[in-house]
Amino acid sequence: MRWWLLLGVAGALVPQVPGRVRVRASREAPRASTALAAAAAVRWVAPVAAAVVGGVVLKKRLDRPSRPYDRAANSVGREYDAWTREGILEHYWGEHIHLGYYTDEEMRRGYLLKNFVEAKYNFTERMMEWGGINDLEGPLKILDVGCGIGGTTRYMASKLPEADVTGITLSSEQVGRATALAKAREIPNAKFQVMDALRMDFPDNSFDVVWGCESGEHMPDKGEYVREMTRVLKPNGKLVVATWCQRDNATQSFTAEEEQALDFLYSEWTHPYFISIQDYDRIIRDTSQYATVETDDWTTNTIASWRHSIWVGVFDPWPVIRAGPRMWWKCLRDGICLERMHRAFKRGLMEYGMFRATKKPAAT
């Protein structure tokens, strides 16, 4: 029972006194009670109003992308430099900065039962198998375009000890970390360089395999991205690519709400734009350099990664907590973007594109 109701009950129990005193008390008690209630309400109005206004302001800030793509400023390299120095991404995601793979059975049991880092190794294994790389033998030369801190580069170098595996990235911090890990693990056939994937220094026909895992998202020219990978790929070589794609809007245009959702996903993590699986397929075929081109959509087997990555932070928050307020804010933004990615993939606005192609033999 609230305190002003208690006052009313207490007043009713006071013995009646003849004369005007009783009348005056009956008129003034409600007034006093009302005044007290009004004062209490006023005390609550300010904090509630402040909370509402603060919530509106916070939502507006969180709805506004904070890291737009800027090629001239090397925004991609700059962001990955920061993530590498901070160590938070590596702590939660491990050495592979890409989505994980979950079998149908694992999804039925519950994706949280699977180790998040293990899921990334599973993805690399599946991609190698799907791309036909496990069947290759001999002293291969493999290029990992957009290698991150070199998890996949080192994994392929370990699985194929006769191969020479090179990873490239725009981030000097990633190259430093990747090189240090390769040295610590004694993997001498994994090497790393800072290089722009759209202007590679390698000669034509240099590699037996060109691998791109979640790097195309950051490319400002998807056509040049494919053409450069094609240029450095040897005749009969294999191109294997995994990348986030947006829905093909050739037959169904994006709504205003969908465009707004995509704009956020572009600019929160310094992506220039995405394209569809169909667009990538056309770009690869338009090179006229491939004997076979195949595509697939791995959304079903990767979508759990988005929310899984949020939960690993919930289960183990201390690295973020110890890092201080600036990291709290950054991880809050990243968590929101992860959830928005999940929703975009869930409703079909985004798709997980897989591409494998074999380059034609050399002309005779």
Image (cartoon, helix red, strand yellow):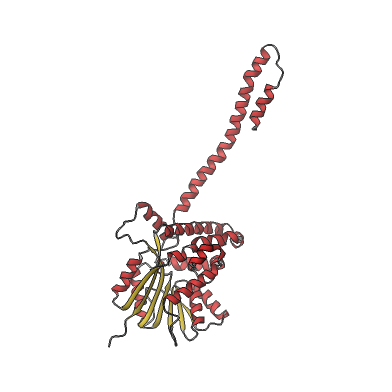
Q: In the displayed image of the protein, which residue is found farthest to the top?
A: 19
Q: Residue at x 43, y 63 (%)?
A: 270
Image spot of residue 78 (x, y percent): 47, 67
Image spot of residue 46 (x, y percent): 56, 38
Image spot of residue 103 (x, y percent): 49, 68
Instruction: Report the quarter where the C terminus lies.
Output: bottom left
Is residue 306 in sight in this rendering?
A: yes
327 vs 101: above or below: above
270 and 341: which is toward the camera? 341
194 and 209: which is toward the camera? 209
Q: Residue at x 63, y 24 (%)?
A: 32
Instruction: Report the quarter where the N terminus lies.
Output: top right
Q: Which image quadrant for residue 317? A: bottom right
71 vs 208: above or below: above
Image side of residue 215 versus residue 107, left or right: left
Q: Which image quadrant for residue 319? A: bottom right
Q: How many marks?
A: 0
Is residue 173 in sight in this rendering?
A: no
Image spot of residue 69 (x, y percent): 41, 63
Q: Residue at x 65, y 16 (%)?
A: 24
